[in-house]
């Protein structure tokens, strides 16, 4: 039996319900299912209830760590586990400490970074991070273009997120009926669904305000439309949504908050009930909720930014409405010197809502069905798994590890 | 020879990193490991700042380090005392980090590259039973230290490095991209003590219109990472763009991890006209030593650790008298206080002084080496022959082995007049 390829992963704890944790779990499960890999995961979080090594299966162990670990921990695990590949994921700002000693890792172990960056202009300040990897897998087409231009010397491959389409699928009408009967406020309404963290960049407050403006139109029957927000309205990172909702006079079931945590199956019911899923974030690397929505055959209204734009259209066909930004402000911080923030206008938003609202159910269904085909073709969960397996095997063959390490140049001679 | 197989020696050092202290740790460890009928050697591996770990060194020492870890755990589990188990402990690290571990602790250090070691070191040095340093400058640096009237009384011995340069080296493949023929090499960390920016400025000022002159800098700030490379190149690029936008001479930055044989191949007489240093001080100066062992002429300040190996006995052809002569291009210097921005709490303190090489003298040496290389090459060859005879692996390992021998055979004390007696 051929020797299994050992992979050390660093990411959110794979059992956490975060987007990063979920995608990490999908990735690892695909590797393990292939029978060709053995995985040791450092499961990151701010704090864990306990730090015991978890044996998930014969080929997969998870060690909970604060943050994403530290230099001493990484080096000791590398010396003990002797991985053939290191795979890590999430925002580059969380990994500056890791790249600061990549020269201790890469002579033996190739580093594979799974990366998403929200927007242009090309973040040249990320070059020092990008150049510190052997391979960068990119989650969105925007990120792919960015990495190719910022660090042309580093191998890049576009490998977008995926959803399990057997879970995220259109619910049976009987099931929808059952849920609506349990929630009479939803009875006979066109439901606009919003499933996001209540955070600044998601524009949750703007959405509520513009939704109230949308309702003021004569052509809209307020009793037959609602905005269902699956979020924590009191999230400390966002606005007080219940307060805003009341302030805008939305007191009669026009806005409904779904606050309880729920599993993927239950979430799929909500997508299925909705006429449309909205995401008007000003920055969105990928946007898993809209991907899940399309998988459930529910069309989407999104800002044409980041990864959302590749979901709403494949370049030829549309699976909802993409709203072009009305302004591209160049914002930033000490760590991120510049990045576009894509804001849409109220007028464009209300026009998109009107268009979706006045569509016939058949038209929306048609968009939704085409959307699921788009997901099936381009963000298929099975492909996601098999592509990762094939890609990781290929990286191992081309870059080697330890005694077989190749295609790694440790030094450069530059003329200044 | 006495059999020490039942004796145990503990060495604490950064065996797996790429740094001067790490080479020092390995030199000592290898000397004792190679000792015939020597003691059992245990290694506690320390991380040297943020320096790169070399896979080759990790591989060379990992079994012994792992064995030591297991042994220490076993000692803990049996409540055994470390000082009763080990006959002595060598601690290869700066004196402010030395601690009492066994009944015979030996501090091993390059000391400080200033005139005087900080007063904070005195008590730690006196905690040791013996101190080994790499140069007479390092020894004097410790002897100059005073803390509230107290001086360092622990016996200090000088044990330098030995030549590791092979007689025949392969040419460094990176040199294929060097277009200049008058090339100077400097292998050094980019740190205030090394004075690299001034050295680069002086080089450019001397050769600014000479497109055939090149300075090869093998350097780094903290380690060999890509991020470090970008910071290092940015630092020099900005400096050159602002100060010397019109320069024609070439500055090459060589950054990253090189194997031992690649490092050796940098010191290539065919490519390198001279080795240059404008450092404020050296404990020993390993790269300068490598240049000497390769027969490459050296330009360096006439002060600090490297002076030990930059002179050789030379016979006067007329009188037949033999005199020790400096065989390098001496750069004049001033001794002045360390600039405030270069102080390091607990190490380089406000009272510290080091040397400031004089630009005019450094540039004159550059010009001299380029315009009349023959005489300097002859001196370099003479020096090389002498150093290869005197700084041999056997001799230096022998010195370390003698130290262990003396410790195990009987604790030694130094009398007031410096004579060593055995109890």
Image (spheres, coloured by chain):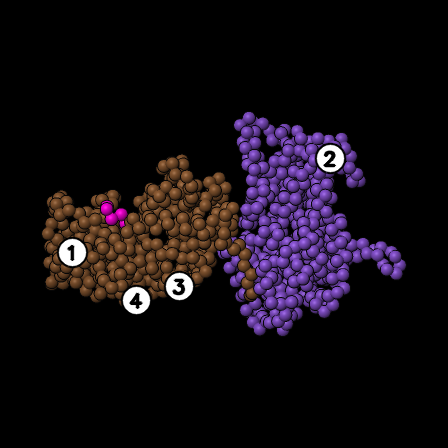
Chain colours: A brown, B purple
Ranked by sequence position, the earlier of labels 1 and 4 is 4
Q: Under tag 3, what secondary structure?
A: loop
User: Whole-Å distance between the Cαs marked 1 and 3?
Assistant: 38 Å
CA distance for labels 1 and 4: 32 Å
Q: Nearer the viewer, mark 1 or mark 3?
A: 1
Q: Chain of mark 4?
A: A
Disc 4 secondary structure class: strand
For marks 3 and 4 on the same chain, the one whose residue lies earlier in the sequence: 3
Q: Looking at the image, is mark 1 or mark 4 nearer the viewer?
A: 1
Horizontal side, residue A330 vs residue B417: left or right: left
Label 3: which residue? Answer: A122
Labels 3 and 4 positioned on one and the same chain = yes
The numbered dot on residue B27 is none
* Residue that numbered label 4 is attached to: A327
In which quadrant is the N terminus of chain B drawn?
top right
Between the C-alphas of marks 3 and 4, the distance is 18 Å
Kindly state the secondary structure of the residue where label 1 is placed: helix
Query: Which residue is the site of mark 1?
Result: A365
Q: Observer-nearest residue: B95 or B201?
A: B201
Q: Which residue is mark 2?
A: B406
Dot 1 surroundings within 10 Å: few (below 14), some, or many (20 or more)?
some
The answer to whether marks 1 and 3 sit on the same chain is: yes
- Distance from disc 4 to disc 2, alpha carbons, whole Å, reads 80 Å
Do marks 1 and 4 share a subunit?
yes
**Mark 1 to mark 2 CA distance (whole Å):** 91 Å
Badge 4: how crowded within 10 Å, few (<14), some, or many (20+)?
A: few
> What chain does badge 2 belong to?
B
Which range is magenta? Answer: A163-167
- Residue B97 seen by the camera: no
- Report in which chain the residue with disc 1 lies: A
> Are the residues at dot 1 and dot 2 in contact (C-beta closer than 8 Å)?
no
Determine the residue positioned at 43% across, 41% down.
Answer: A3
């Amino acid at each position: 039996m051929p020797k299994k390829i050992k992979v050390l992963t660093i990411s959110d704890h794979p059992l956490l319900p975060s987007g990063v944790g979920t995608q990490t779990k999908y990735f690892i499960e695909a590797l393990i299912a292939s029978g060709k890999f053995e995985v040791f995961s450092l499961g990151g979080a701010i704090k864990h209830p306990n730090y015991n090594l978890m044996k998930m299966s014969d080929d997969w162990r998870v060690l909970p760590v604060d943050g994403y670990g530290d230099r001493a921990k990484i080096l000791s695990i590398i010396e003990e586990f002797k991985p053939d590949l290191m795979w890590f994921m999430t925002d580059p700002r969380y990994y500056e400490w890791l790249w600061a000693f990549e020269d201790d890792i890469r002579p033996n172990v190739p580093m594979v970074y799974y990366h998403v960056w929200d927007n242009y202009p090309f973040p040249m300040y990320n070059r020092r991070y990008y150049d510190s990897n052997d391979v960068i897998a990119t989650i969105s087409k925007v990120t792919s273009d960015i990495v190719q231009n910022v660090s042309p010397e580093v191998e890049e491959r576009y490998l977008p997120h995926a959803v399990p389409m057997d879970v995220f699928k259109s619910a049976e009408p009987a099931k929808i009926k059952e849920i609506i009967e349990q929630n009479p406020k939803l009875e006979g309404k066109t439901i606009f669904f919003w499933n996001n963290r209540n955070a600044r960049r998601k524009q949750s407050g703007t959405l509520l305000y513009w939704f109230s403006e949308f309702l003021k139109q004569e052509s809209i029957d307020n009793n037959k439309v609602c905005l269902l927000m699956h979020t924590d309205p009191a999230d400390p990172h966002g606005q007080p949504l219940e307060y805003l909702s009341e302030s805008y006079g939305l007191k009669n079931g026009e806005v409904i908050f779904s606050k309880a945590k729920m599993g993927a199956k239950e979430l799929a019911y909500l997508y299925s009930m909705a006429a449309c899923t909205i995401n008007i974030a000003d920055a969105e690397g990928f946007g898993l909720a809209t991907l899940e929505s399309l998988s459930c055959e529910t069309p989407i209204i999104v800002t044409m930014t980041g990864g959302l734009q590749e979901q709403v259209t494949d370049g030829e066909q549309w699976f909802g409405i993409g709203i072009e930004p009305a302004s591209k402000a160049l914002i930033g911080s000490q760590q991120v010197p510049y990045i576009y923030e894509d804001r849409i206008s109220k007028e464009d938003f209300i026009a998109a809502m009107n268009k979706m609202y006045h569509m016939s159910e058949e038209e929306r269904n048609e968009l939704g069905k085409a959307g699921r085909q788009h997901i099936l073709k381009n963000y298929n969960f099975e492909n996601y798994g098999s592509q990762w397996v094939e890609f990781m095997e290929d990286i191992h063959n081309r870059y080697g590890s330890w005694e077989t390490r190749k295609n790694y140049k440790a030094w450069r001679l530059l003329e200044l | 020879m006495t059999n020490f197989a039942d004796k145990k020696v503990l060495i604490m050092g950064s065996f797996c990193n790429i740094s001067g202290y790490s080479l020092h740790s390995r030199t000592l460890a290898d000397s004792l490991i190679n000792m015939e009928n020597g003691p059992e050697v245990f290694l506690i591996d320390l991380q040297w700042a943020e320096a790169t770990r070399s896979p080759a060194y990790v591989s060379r020492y990992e079994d012994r380090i792992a064995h030591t870890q297991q042994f220490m755990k076993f000692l803990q589990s049996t409540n055994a005392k470390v000082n009763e188990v080990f006959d002595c402990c060598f601690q290869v690290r700066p004196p402010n980090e030395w601690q009492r571990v066994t009944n015979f602790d030996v501090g091993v250090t390059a000391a400080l590259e200033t005139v005087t070691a900080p007063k904070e070191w005195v008590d730690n040095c006196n905690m040791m039973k013996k101190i080994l340093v790499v140069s007479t400058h390092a020894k004097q640096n410790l002897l100059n230290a005073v803390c509230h009237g107290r001086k360092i009384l622990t016996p200090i011995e000088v044990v330098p490095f030995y030549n590791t340069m092979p007689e025949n080296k392969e040419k460094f493949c990176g040199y294929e991209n060097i277009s200049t023929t008058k090339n100077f090499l400097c292998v050094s960390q980019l740190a205030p003590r090394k004075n690299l920016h001034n050295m680069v400025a002086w080089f450019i000022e001397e050769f600014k219109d000479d497109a055939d002159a090149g300075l090869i800098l093998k350097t780094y700030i903290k380690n060999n990472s890509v991020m470090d490379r970008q910071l290092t190149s940015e630092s020099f690029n900005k400096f050159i763009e602002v100060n010397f936008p019109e320069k024609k001479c070439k500055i090459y930055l060589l950054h990253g991890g090189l194997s031992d044989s690649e490092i050796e191949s940098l010191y290539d007489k065919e490519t390198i006209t001279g080795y240059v240093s404008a450092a404020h001080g050296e404990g020993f100066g390993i790269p300068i030593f490598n240049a000497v062992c390769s027969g490459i002429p050296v330009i360096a300040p006439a002060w600090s650790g490297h002076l030990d190996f930059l002179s050789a006995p030379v016979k006067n052809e007329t009188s037949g008298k033999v005199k020790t002569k400096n065989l390098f291009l001496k750069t004049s210097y001033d001794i002045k206080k360390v600039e405030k921005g270069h102080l390091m709490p607990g190490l380089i303190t406000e009272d510290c002084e080091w040397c400031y090489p004089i630009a005019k003298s450094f540039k004159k040496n550059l010009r001299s080496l380029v315009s009349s290389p023959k005489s300097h090459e002859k001196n370099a060859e003479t020096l090389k022959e002498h150093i290869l005879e005197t700084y041999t692996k056997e001799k230096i390992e022998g010195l370390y082995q003698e130290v262990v021998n003396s410790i195990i055979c009987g604790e030694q004390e130094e009398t007031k007049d410096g004579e060593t007696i055995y109890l």
